[in-house]
């Protein structure tokens, strides 16, 4: 094992971090926007609202992301209405194909996460909101969703980490994000250990930062007093000084 | 589909086989990992912590690439001429490592959810520590862990598709080859989706049934 080569590889692979983050963050944002209304439909008591969303989440959670990505990247071009419209400008680019696949996939998982949260909100709170005359939309967005979001934050954090890792599949449709760059580098240097370990270290850093960020958000939203919200090592450091 | 039905059937077999082997071995790794995490020895706890933290923070695809290309490089250096690792065993090894890491966390959580009194009671009626584990802790732990294991098994089934990238002839690989040679990606990838969906549905139903059986006598 060549430590110098690992460090050199990390420097090269850092060039792919921007694309990895771009794909991850955009997919998560689109997935979030899609999943909020759909989660309310999914949690609804009416089967007409709930079942179509269940069909969507069931199919997208029941098949591999790789199949979904290839279906979009290789399959969309076969459809005449895609090829003959402005959509083709978008979907002949592997970036947008990956973005579409990741967003739809992330939305499916996020819907089920949020549904659990929505169903865990005590009905008394909704009744109280109705009693003071809030409109159904306002109740959903100002009462139910914020409470639901706080409850499911740890699960949502897992979803975010999952998305960072899943973005590595973009390398299979020629995109040069971290994994794509790593595969290219391996074919040039024939040093699989060093390069893939370097890539792994970068992903580990990214996923670690993401889970730390969500821990902080969780502490912040839990309304803990500032002293308790500080991490123990910080307190210890303070006492030591 | 030009004779690809039969290939799909063989691909299905390979997918199920790889998932079943990795799942079984991964469960054993998970049990050992959970035992290490709850052990009295600090070194074991640290090793298990490092294992789960690293593996769960890195993409599955990267683990597969590392094992496949790294394994090939190691074997080649060892033998002296170019030797390629079989995609099947590289895949099984990688997915066992991944499954084991998540299973470790599931089992650890499930074991910790069992009240301490259970262990104390078992020891006080004279069971040996290994009997306590086998007869008291494990059966209760299995029930608690089952729903999470079901989810883990389903992601394992889906992750097997990643091994096709290093050449395993599973469902995904058959779809890629068929889509290329028949110039009909939509049909082939939809067929692959249907097969995967069938596998995950059957798994869900099976786990439901097992869960109901396990819960029945207690309610």
Image (tube, grey):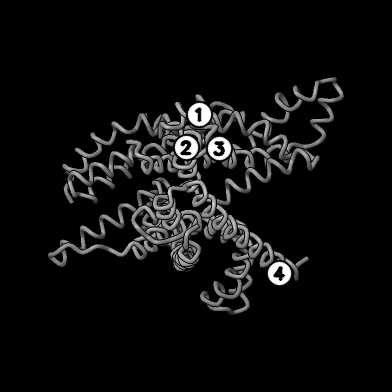
- Which of pointers 1 and 2 indicates the residue nearer the eye? 1
Which of the two residues, A241 or B53, is positioned nearer the viewer here? B53
Q: What x and y, as percent, mark residue B37?
A: 45, 58
Q: Is residue A26 left or right of residue B212?
A: left
The picture quadrant where one finds residue A105 is top right
- Asked if marks 2 and 3 fall on the same chain, the answer is yes
Q: Is residue A80 left or right of residue B67?
A: right
| Residue B24 against residue A163 in the figure, above or below | below
Find numbered disc 3 in the image and state the secondary structure of the residue it sits on.
helix
Sequence-first tag of 2 and 3: 2
Crowd rating for badge 1 (residues with CA inside 10 Å; few <14, some 14–19, many 20+)? few
- Asked if marks 1 and 2 fall on the same chain, the answer is yes
- Asked if marks 4 and 1 fall on the same chain, the answer is no
- Asked if marks 4 and 2 fall on the same chain, the answer is no
Q: Residue at x 62, y 34 (%)?
A: A35
Crowd rating for badge 2 (residues with CA inside 10 Å; few <14, some 14–19, many 20+)? some
Q: Which of the numbered marks, if any, corresponds to residue A104?
A: 3
Find numbered disc 4 in the image and state the secondary structure of the residue it sits on.
helix
């Amino acid at each position: 094992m060549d430590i110098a080569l690992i460090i050199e590889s990390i420097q090269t692979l850092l060039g792919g971090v921007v694309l990895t983050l771009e794909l991850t963050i955009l997919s998560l944002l689109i997935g979030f926007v899609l999943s909020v209304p759909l989660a309310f439909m999914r949690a609804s008591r009416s089967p007409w609202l709930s079942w179509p969303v269940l069909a969507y989440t069931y199919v997208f959670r029941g098949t591999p992301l790789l199949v979904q990505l290839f279906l979009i990247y290789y399959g969309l071009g076969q459809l005449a209405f895609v090829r003959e419209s402005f959509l083709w400008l978008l979907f002949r680019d592997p970036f947008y194909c990956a973005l579409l696949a990741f967003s739809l996939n992330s939305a499916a998982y996020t819907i089920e996460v949020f549904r659990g949260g929505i169903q865990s909100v005590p009905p008394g709170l909704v009744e109280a909101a109705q009693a003071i005359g809030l409109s159904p939309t306002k109740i959903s967005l100002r009462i139910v969703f914020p409470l639901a979001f706080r409850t499911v934050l740890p699960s949502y954090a897992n979803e975010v980490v999952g998305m960072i890792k899943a973005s590595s599949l973009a390398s299979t449709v020629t995109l040069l994000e971290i994994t794509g760059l790593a595969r290219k580098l391996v074919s040039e240097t024939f040093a699989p250990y060093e390069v893939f370990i370097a890539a792994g270290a970068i992903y580990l850093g990214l996923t670690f930062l993401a889970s730390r960020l969500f821990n902080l958000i969780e502490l912040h939203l839990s309304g803990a007093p500032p002293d308790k919200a500080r991490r123990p090592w910080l307190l210890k450091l303070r006492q030591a000084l | 589909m030009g004779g690809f039905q039969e290939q799909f059937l063989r691909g299905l077999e390979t997918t199920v086989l790889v998932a079943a082997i990795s799942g079984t071995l991964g469960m054993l790794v998970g049990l050992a990992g959970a035992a290490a995490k709850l052990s009295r020895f600090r070194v074991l706890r640290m090793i298990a912590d490092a294992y789960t933290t690293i593996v769960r923070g890195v993409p599955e695809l990267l683990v597969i690439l590392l094992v496949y290309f790294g394994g090939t490089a190691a074997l080649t250096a060892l033998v002296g001429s170019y030797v390629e690792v079989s995609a099947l065993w590289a895949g099984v090894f990688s997915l066992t490592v991944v499954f084991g890491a998540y299973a470790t966390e599931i089992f650890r959580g499930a074991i910790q959810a069992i009240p301490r009194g259970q262990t104390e009671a078992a020891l006080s009626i004279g069971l040996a520590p290994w009997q306590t584990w086998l007869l008291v802790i494990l059966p209760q732990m299995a029930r608690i862990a089952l729903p999470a294991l079901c989810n883990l098994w389903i992601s394992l089934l889906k992750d097997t598709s990643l091994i096709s990238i290093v050449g395993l002839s599973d469902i995904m690989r058959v779809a890629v080859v068929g889509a290329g040679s028949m110039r009909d990606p939509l049909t082939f990838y939809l067929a692959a989706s249907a097969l995967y969906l069938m596998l995950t549905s059957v798994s869900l139903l099976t786990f439901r049934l097992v869960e109901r059986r396990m819960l029945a006598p207690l309610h």
